[in-house]
Image (cartoon, rainbow, N blue to C red):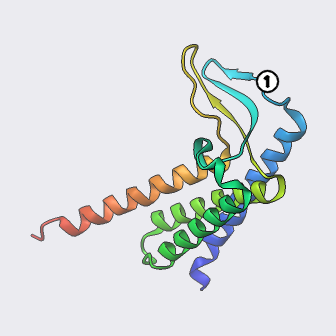
Protein backbone atom coordinates (compact mmCIF):
# COMPACT_ATOMS: atom_id res chain seq x y z
CA UNK A 1 0.00 0.00 0.00
CA UNK A 2 2.98 2.28 0.53
CA UNK A 3 3.37 2.63 -3.25
CA UNK A 4 0.04 4.51 -3.36
CA UNK A 5 1.19 7.19 -0.89
CA UNK A 6 2.48 9.71 -3.47
CA UNK A 7 -0.74 9.37 -5.46
CA UNK A 8 -2.90 9.82 -2.38
CA UNK A 9 -0.90 12.95 -1.54
CA UNK A 10 -1.44 14.22 -5.10
CA UNK A 11 -5.21 13.70 -4.71
CA UNK A 12 -5.23 15.60 -1.40
CA UNK A 13 -3.06 18.40 -2.84
CA UNK A 14 -5.32 18.72 -5.90
CA UNK A 15 -8.44 18.97 -3.73
CA UNK A 16 -6.83 21.46 -1.35
CA UNK A 17 -5.49 23.71 -4.13
CA UNK A 18 -8.81 23.60 -5.99
CA UNK A 19 -10.82 24.47 -2.89
CA UNK A 20 -8.41 27.24 -1.83
CA UNK A 21 -8.59 28.93 -5.24
CA UNK A 22 -12.39 28.58 -5.35
CA UNK A 23 -12.61 30.21 -1.92
CA UNK A 24 -10.48 33.13 -3.13
CA UNK A 25 -12.70 33.44 -6.23
CA UNK A 26 -15.87 33.40 -4.12
CA UNK A 27 -14.54 36.06 -1.76
CA UNK A 28 -12.79 38.32 -4.25
CA UNK A 29 -14.43 38.12 -7.66
CA UNK A 30 -17.78 39.68 -8.56
CA UNK A 31 -20.35 37.25 -9.92
CA UNK A 32 -20.39 37.05 -13.73
CA UNK A 33 -18.16 40.08 -14.30
CA UNK A 34 -15.29 39.41 -16.68
CA UNK A 35 -11.80 40.38 -15.49
CA UNK A 36 -9.38 40.21 -18.41
CA UNK A 37 -5.92 38.85 -17.59
CA UNK A 38 -4.68 38.43 -21.18
CA UNK A 39 -6.35 39.18 -24.52
CA UNK A 40 -7.62 35.56 -24.58
CA UNK A 41 -7.91 34.74 -20.86
CA UNK A 42 -10.23 36.13 -18.21
CA UNK A 43 -11.54 35.38 -14.76
CA UNK A 44 -15.33 35.02 -14.73
CA UNK A 45 -17.03 33.62 -11.64
CA UNK A 46 -20.12 31.63 -12.42
CA UNK A 47 -21.89 28.52 -11.16
CA UNK A 48 -22.28 25.23 -12.99
CA UNK A 49 -25.33 23.25 -11.96
CA UNK A 50 -24.48 20.32 -14.24
CA UNK A 51 -21.37 18.32 -14.94
CA UNK A 52 -18.98 19.38 -17.72
CA UNK A 53 -20.42 22.22 -19.83
CA UNK A 54 -23.58 22.15 -17.65
CA UNK A 55 -24.61 18.75 -19.01
CA UNK A 56 -27.04 16.71 -16.90
CA UNK A 57 -28.14 19.70 -14.82
CA UNK A 58 -31.66 18.21 -14.91
CA UNK A 59 -30.42 15.28 -12.77
CA UNK A 60 -30.48 17.46 -9.64
CA UNK A 61 -27.89 17.59 -6.88
CA UNK A 62 -28.45 14.06 -5.59
CA UNK A 63 -28.26 12.51 -9.06
CA UNK A 64 -25.09 14.42 -9.90
CA UNK A 65 -23.46 13.45 -6.60
CA UNK A 66 -24.28 9.79 -7.30
CA UNK A 67 -22.82 10.05 -10.83
CA UNK A 68 -19.66 11.69 -9.48
CA UNK A 69 -19.22 9.03 -6.77
CA UNK A 70 -19.67 6.26 -9.36
CA UNK A 71 -17.11 7.89 -11.67
CA UNK A 72 -14.60 8.23 -8.83
CA UNK A 73 -15.17 4.60 -7.83
CA UNK A 74 -14.65 3.45 -11.45
CA UNK A 75 -11.45 5.52 -11.81
CA UNK A 76 -10.13 4.12 -8.52
CA UNK A 77 -10.92 0.60 -9.78
CA UNK A 78 -8.92 1.29 -12.96
CA UNK A 79 -6.08 2.84 -10.96
CA UNK A 80 -5.79 -0.19 -8.66
CA UNK A 81 -5.58 -2.46 -11.71
CA UNK A 82 -2.80 -0.33 -13.24
CA UNK A 83 0.68 -1.87 -12.82
CA UNK A 84 3.12 0.00 -10.57
CA UNK A 85 5.42 0.79 -13.51
CA UNK A 86 2.74 2.89 -15.21
CA UNK A 87 3.56 6.02 -13.23
CA UNK A 88 2.13 8.41 -15.83
CA UNK A 89 -1.24 6.63 -15.76
CA UNK A 90 -1.28 6.54 -11.97
CA UNK A 91 -0.56 10.28 -11.83
CA UNK A 92 -3.36 10.76 -14.35
CA UNK A 93 -5.80 8.73 -12.26
CA UNK A 94 -4.82 10.71 -9.14
CA UNK A 95 -5.49 14.00 -10.95
CA UNK A 96 -8.86 12.74 -12.20
CA UNK A 97 -9.88 11.65 -8.70
CA UNK A 98 -8.60 14.88 -7.12
CA UNK A 99 -10.46 17.01 -9.65
CA UNK A 100 -13.66 15.01 -9.38
CA UNK A 101 -13.59 15.16 -5.59
CA UNK A 102 -12.85 18.91 -5.66
CA UNK A 103 -15.98 19.48 -7.75
CA UNK A 104 -17.93 17.00 -5.63
CA UNK A 105 -17.15 19.07 -2.51
CA UNK A 106 -18.63 22.14 -4.25
CA UNK A 107 -21.74 20.28 -5.30
CA UNK A 108 -22.26 18.77 -1.84
CA UNK A 109 -21.68 22.08 0.00
CA UNK A 110 -23.15 24.67 -2.39
CA UNK A 111 -25.37 22.70 -4.78
CA UNK A 112 -23.27 23.88 -7.74
CA UNK A 113 -19.66 23.95 -8.92
CA UNK A 114 -17.73 27.22 -8.87
CA UNK A 115 -16.17 27.97 -12.27
CA UNK A 116 -13.93 30.93 -13.02
CA UNK A 117 -11.54 30.44 -15.99
CA UNK A 118 -12.66 31.76 -19.38
CA UNK A 119 -10.69 31.38 -22.61
CA UNK A 120 -12.09 33.69 -25.29
CA UNK A 121 -11.52 35.72 -28.43
CA UNK A 122 -13.59 38.70 -29.58
CA UNK A 123 -15.89 36.32 -31.49
CA UNK A 124 -15.67 33.04 -29.57
CA UNK A 125 -15.46 31.83 -25.99
CA UNK A 126 -14.83 28.43 -24.44
CA UNK A 127 -16.97 27.15 -21.57
CA UNK A 128 -16.04 28.55 -18.17
CA UNK A 129 -14.18 25.98 -16.09
CA UNK A 130 -12.06 25.61 -12.95
CA UNK A 131 -8.81 24.02 -11.78
CA UNK A 132 -10.56 20.75 -10.87
CA UNK A 133 -11.81 20.48 -14.46
CA UNK A 134 -8.25 21.09 -15.69
CA UNK A 135 -6.97 18.34 -13.36
CA UNK A 136 -9.56 15.94 -14.80
CA UNK A 137 -8.66 16.82 -18.40
CA UNK A 138 -4.89 16.64 -17.87
CA UNK A 139 -5.31 13.40 -15.90
CA UNK A 140 -7.34 11.82 -18.71
CA UNK A 141 -4.72 12.93 -21.26
CA UNK A 142 -1.96 11.36 -19.13
CA UNK A 143 -3.86 8.06 -18.91
CA UNK A 144 -4.36 8.00 -22.69
CA UNK A 145 -0.71 8.95 -23.25
CA UNK A 146 0.43 6.12 -20.96
CA UNK A 147 -1.79 3.68 -22.86
CA UNK A 148 -0.28 4.80 -26.16
CA UNK A 149 3.24 4.38 -24.78
CA UNK A 150 2.34 0.90 -23.51
CA UNK A 151 0.72 -0.05 -26.80
CA UNK A 152 3.82 1.08 -28.70
CA UNK A 153 6.10 -0.89 -26.38
CA UNK A 154 4.06 -4.06 -26.82
CA UNK A 155 3.87 -3.83 -30.63
CA UNK A 156 7.54 -3.02 -31.19
CA UNK A 157 9.19 -5.94 -33.06
CA UNK A 158 11.88 -7.80 -31.17
CA UNK A 159 15.29 -7.85 -32.90
| Residue at the farthest bottom position | 1
Residue 56 in sight from this viewpoint: yes
| Residue at the farthest front position | 58
Identify which residue is drawn at 81% across, 50% down. 20
Q: How many badges with numbers are in the image?
A: 1
Where is the N terminus found, in terms of image quarters?
bottom right
Residue 123 in the image: state x and y as whole percent: 55, 14
| Residue at the farthest top position | 122
Q: Nearer the viewer, residue 37 or 128?
A: 128
Q: From the viewer's perspective, tell me whether residue 132 is left or right of residue 138.
A: right
Identify which residue is drawn at 52% across, 50% down. 138
| Residue 121 picture quarter | top right
Residue 16 in sight from this viewpoint: no
Q: Which residue is mark 1?
A: 33
Where is the C terminus found, in terms of image quarters?
bottom left
Q: From the viewer's perspective, tell me whether residue 21 is left or right of residue 96.
A: right
For disc 1, the neighbor class at 10 Å (few under 14, some 14 to 19, many from 20) is few
Residue 68 in the image: state x and y as whole percent: 63, 62
Above or below, 88 relative to 1 = above
Identify which residue is drawn at 66% across, 65% down. 11
Q: Nearer the viewer, residue 83 or 131?
A: 131
Above or below, 122 relative to 80 = above
| Residue 22 picture quarter | top right
Q: From the viewer's perspective, tell me whether residue 110 is left or right of residue 67.
A: right
Amino acid sequence: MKSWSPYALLVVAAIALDQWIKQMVENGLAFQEKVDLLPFLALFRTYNTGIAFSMFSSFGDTGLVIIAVLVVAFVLYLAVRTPAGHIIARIGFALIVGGALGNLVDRAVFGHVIDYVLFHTPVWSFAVFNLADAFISVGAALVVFDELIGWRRETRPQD
